[in-house]
Image (tube, rainbow, N blue to C red):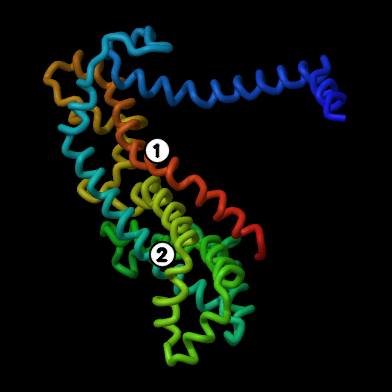
Amino acid sequence: MFLAHSKMRASKSDRIFDFVNYSLLILALLIVAYPLWFVVIASVSSSSHVLNGEVTLLPKGFQLKAYEMVFQNRNIVLGYRNTIFYTAAGTSINIVATVLIAYTLAQSDLRGRGPITFLLSFTMFFSGGLIPTYLVYRSLGIINTRWVMILPGMISVYNVIIARTFFQNSIPSELQDAAYIDGASALKTLTWVVIPLSKPILAVLTIFYGVGHWNSFFNALVFLSKNELYPLQLVLRNILITGAERVEAVGIASVAEQVRYAESIKYAVIIVSSVPVLLLYPFMQKYFVQGVMIGAIKG
């Protein structure tokens, strides 16, 4: 039986299928990986070689001048600091608010749980639009402040649903009942019983919110006009698209040298802005999968 099965797997049609399959997968890998690899080698190559299109597979004229100029640029360094602050503060507020709402909605004896969930879900499909949103933010006094990068996205309904599902399906109700019998309040039960058992979902929420804050630039583009408040992604956008930061980023007197180094600086800024997230993904990848599975168990 085993020999017959082995012979069947080793048939010509199977070998052709495997060859085509692997070929397509390798081709897809190359299509996805090459642009990333090109950004890396271009950032450490001589600017003249990059401008002349001579950099293809390996770096030419290896140098780190672009990275030196990136970290000497005041706007880039300030944008980096702002992004770290927005990510840390915003993610912390996101997690606290999401856990409180999700844990409350997970309680089966909560009155009005259905209508509340409906109203939250309704916001996923409809919004007031950009101009009304701007007017609301202006009336709240958060335009051109750091709060406009933190407060508007304080709650993600999708993440609330994921967290609520986790609390309902993964935290035994008997543990919570025991805590109530011992005289613990709802807040103490959440703090001392539920949260210690919820490390997987907390990791998922941290990743989702953290990556969102790190890559966020639209709110800054619309609601911020002060350069000292710009996040790194908006500074990067200015360098890549508008060129508004080119002269200061290069920091060289000669216009010819500014143009020559501009391309390498663009690639160096992309690498610098992506490294923290790239370092985070390998360690947190399993939590992404777990988060998707949590949301797929029960809506």
Answer above or below: position of 238 versus 202. Answer: above
User: Which residue occupies the foreground of this view, 71 or 193?
Assistant: 193
Q: Secondary structure at mark 1?
A: helix
Residue 278 is marked as 1
Quadrant of the image containing the N terminus:
top right
Residue at the farthest left position = 253
Q: Residue at x 46, y 23 (%)?
A: 35
Quadrant of the image containing the C terminus:
bottom right
Q: Residue at x 77, y 21 (%)?
A: 17
Answer above or below: position of 229 versus 16. Answer: below
Q: Residue at x 56, y 63 (%)?
A: 162
Which badge, 1 or 2, is on the more N-terminal residue? 2
Answer above or below: position of 173 versus 63. Answer: below
Image location (x, y in percent) of residue 118: 62, 73
Image location (x, y in percent) of residue 257: 19, 15
Q: CA distance from mark 1 to mark 2?
A: 22 Å
Q: Quadrant of residue 24?
A: top right
Residue type at numbered disc 1: Leu
Residue type at numbered disc 2: Ile
Image location (x, y in percent) of residue 76: 23, 38
**Residue 225 seen in the figure:** no
Q: For this view, does 13 lie left or right of residue 232? A: right
Residue 95 is marked as 2
Q: Residue at x 66, y 61 (%)?
A: 297
Q: Secondary structure at mark 2?
A: helix
Tally of numbered discs: 2
Q: Residues within 10 Å of mark 2 (few under 14, many from 20)?
A: many
Q: Quadrant of residue 54?
A: top left
User: Which residue occupies the foreground of this view, 97 or 125?
Assistant: 97
- 1 and 2 marks in contact (CB < 8 Å): no
